[in-house]
Amino acid sequence: MQYNVHFCKIIILTTKVGIMKKIFTIILLFVLVGISSNTSAQNEKFKALFMYNFTKYIEWPSTMQTGDFLIGILGNSPMRSELEVIASKKKIGDQTIKVLTFNSINDVSNCHILFIPNEKSASLEEIALRLDGKGVLIITDKPGLARRGAAINYIIIDGKQNFEISKNAFNNQHLKVNAALYTLGTAVD
């Protein structure tokens, strides 16, 4: 009978240890997901700041230098909230920043900057053709898209946020670019 009591205590302890391991695993997963989403949020913040700073190196056609400065986003993107924070505090020259969301490529209208997130990147060529020569800076978020029509494309190099830049895309959009911007990114043409 004494063995049965000890055996029951061992089973209870083993069960408690198993439960503790499961709880620890669940907590660890939540921490890792939190760190991952925090890193993702940090990347979006960097991209939004990059986008704002790009405007210091670019001159839009004179017809686009009055009214609101429009930043469009194709689809849903966490970038929107980061851009809204910047828009609430900053201006581009004398222009107030407005952030727009376009649900589909048919909704895309004239804006100063159009951000195309990774999940909408298949639409790039069609959008680039539609916006050709209209003075819209197209920014994407998938490696290689600066060679396919984007003027600026976000990339990660050695774990750090960076960007590719296409002179041809800038020329197609009739945007004047300070040469210093080309030295800050990775030129693709």
Image (spheres, rainbow, N blue to C red):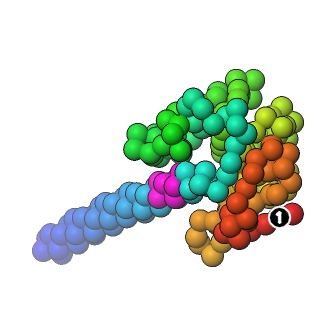
Q: Which residue is mark 1?
A: 188
| Helix, strand or loop status at disc 1 | loop
Circle 1 packing at 10 Å, graded few (<14), some (14-19), many (20+), is some
The stretch in magenta equals 41-49
The amino acid sitting under disc 1 is Val
Residue nearer the viewer, 107 or 111: 111
Q: Is residue 2 above or below residue 67?
A: below
Front in this rendered view, residue 115 or 132: 132
Q: Chief secondary structure of the magenta span?
A: helix
Q: Residue drawn at (32%, 65%), measured in percent from left and top?
A: 24
The number of numbered discs placed on residues in the rendered structure image is 1
Q: Give me the residue at 59% from left, 72% from top.
A: 159
Looking at the image, residue 52 sits to the left or right of residue 18; the answer is right
Q: Nearer the viewer, residue 101 or 59?
A: 59
Say which residue appears at 63% left-offset and 37% top-offset: 65
Rendered location of residue 91, percent (x, y): 48, 43
- Looking at the image, residue 38 sits to the left or right of residue 80; the answer is left
Residue 7 at least partly seen:
no
Whole-percent x, y for residue 104 in the image:
70, 27
Furthest-top residue in view?
107
Report which quarter residue 116 is drawn in: top right
Residue 21 place in picture, x, y as percent:
33, 67
Which quadrant: the C terminus?
bottom right
